[in-house]
Amino acid sequence: DINEIIALCACTNWQERRDGLMSLQYYLSQEIKLTSGELKHLTEIFTKMFMDSHTKGWGVFLDTLHEIIKMHKEDLDYWVYVLLQRVFLKIGGETLNSIQSKLIHTLDLIKYSFPVSLLIANVYRFLLDATQTPNLKSKTVVLNFLSTLCSQQDAAAAISTTPNALQALQKLIAFSQDSKSTEMRQVAKLCIVALWNCNTPAVTMMLTELPKEQQDIASNIVHNHMRKTSNSSEPSSPMISGSPKPLSPSTPPFGDQEDVYKSLRRTTAEIQNYSFETLGPKLDRDRDTTSQDSGISQMSAGNDVRNDIGILEEKMEDLRPFGIRSGARSLPYTSVNGVTETDSNGCRSLGDLKDSDAIVKEVIDRCCIDHLTPLAEKRGLLNQILDLIRQGHVQSILTNFK
């Protein structure tokens, strides 16, 4: 009888209350839904149970609460604020680790059971409720919960359109300047960043309505976070159009392969962009700005040539680990400036090319600055050098580079 079960749940004796909770779990397992009156009576009883200092029976209580939420989540909107309030405060108290785990699970269940707009509205309400005096641990849990809500679908509209959103943002900014707790400041800053990332235009508009001092605080928090994020992530090279291929099992290991690969790609691209026409027009291939400004694309006679060759020669030193290898596909990259291993502007692969020493000698003879070889032929010869580099036949290039 459900009425008898509810009466047992309301008992002050913890053993009778536990029996009532166990019976309620069995009743719910039969997929019998409670009436609105029965549900309201139970939620009132559960609200009081949260304040019970008796630790016995807490696990059974939380398990039963989970079943109530799962079955009646569409009918519990009126109770969400009280539920969140009780969970937040209980987590901030001294409880057994097993109970703490169940309380965290309760928060997760709440997060996925109720609309995100309803949850954000009630978190804002809790933050601004003057009757609540949460401790540091509870505040941290609240802010972390709000941060996770910002990653939920449909959260973007709710964070700014919810009533008291502006006052809640002011509260977060105040927490970020807490003078007593470093943890509180850090969690509040992360929460502000989460709101910003969730809906940047809306949060920006909200900030314009705040006093200048608070605007500056929030702006600094966001900018510092962006700067740290930018510094921690290594920018990818714009010269590389394909991701590196993994080395084959037969490839010998090197100390720092990634650095060698990057240097090799960079050097190869610079050779490809080399123009022997003094201040001549750019080749009809798209150029990376870094390559154009590196001093390689505009070489002239005399000291300029020697200086630039010196720079390029230093870069070629990074190729030496590959000089000991030969055979097709010895270099672990897909393409340079969009040129694949097997197709370099229509040039043939290494298997069809002449001996590498002969190719290098022909380049030396025909691509001198004062030689009258047409630009198109020079470009074709340099593309053969590219093919040699891709296939790992670089010893002749290193020997004759000057």
Image (cartoon, grey):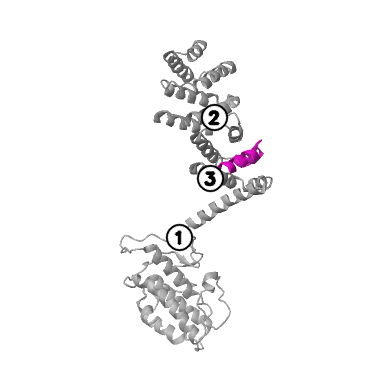
Residue 315's spot in the image, x, y percent? Answer: 42, 73
Graded by Cα atoms within 10 Å as few (under 14), some (14 to 19) or many (20 or more), the crowding at tag 3 reads: some
Q: Which residues are magenta?
A: 154-176
Q: Main secondary structure of the magenta part?
A: helix
**Is there any visible trace of residue 342 in the rendered image?**
no
Query: Does the magenta segment cover residue 47?
Result: no
| Amino acid at dot 1 | Ser
Residue 25's spot in the image, x, y percent? Answer: 46, 19
Residue 333 appears left or right of 114? left
Residue drawn at x 46%, y 24% is 62
| Amino acid at dot 2 | Leu
Q: Secondary structure at mark 3?
A: helix
**Label 1–label 2 contact, CB within 8 A:** no
Give me the C-alpha separation between circle 1 and circle 2.
Answer: 47 Å
Query: In the rendered view, would you say 167 is above or below 382?
Result: above
According to the picture, the residue beneath numbered tag 1 turns out to be 243
- 54 or 151: nearer the viewer: 54
Query: Does the magenta segment cover residue 156?
Result: yes
Residue drawn at x 62%, y 38% is 168
Residue drawn at x 58%, y 52% is 220
Give me the C-alpha separation between circle 1 and circle 3.
Answer: 33 Å
According to the picture, the residue beneath numbered tag 2 turns out to be 84
According to the picture, the residue beneath numbered tag 3 turns out to be 190
Query: In the rendered view, would you say 226 is above or below 25?
Result: below
Q: Secondary structure at mark 2?
A: helix
Tell me which numbered mark, 2 or 3, is placed earlier along the sequence.
2
Graded by Cα atoms within 10 Å as few (under 14), some (14 to 19) or many (20 or more), the crowding at tag 1 reads: few
| Amino acid at dot 3 | Leu
Residue 26's mark? Answer: none
Tell me which numbered mark, 1 or 2, is placed earlier along the sequence.
2
- 144 or 175: nearer the viewer: 175
Tell me which numbered mark, 1 or 3, is placed earlier along the sequence.
3
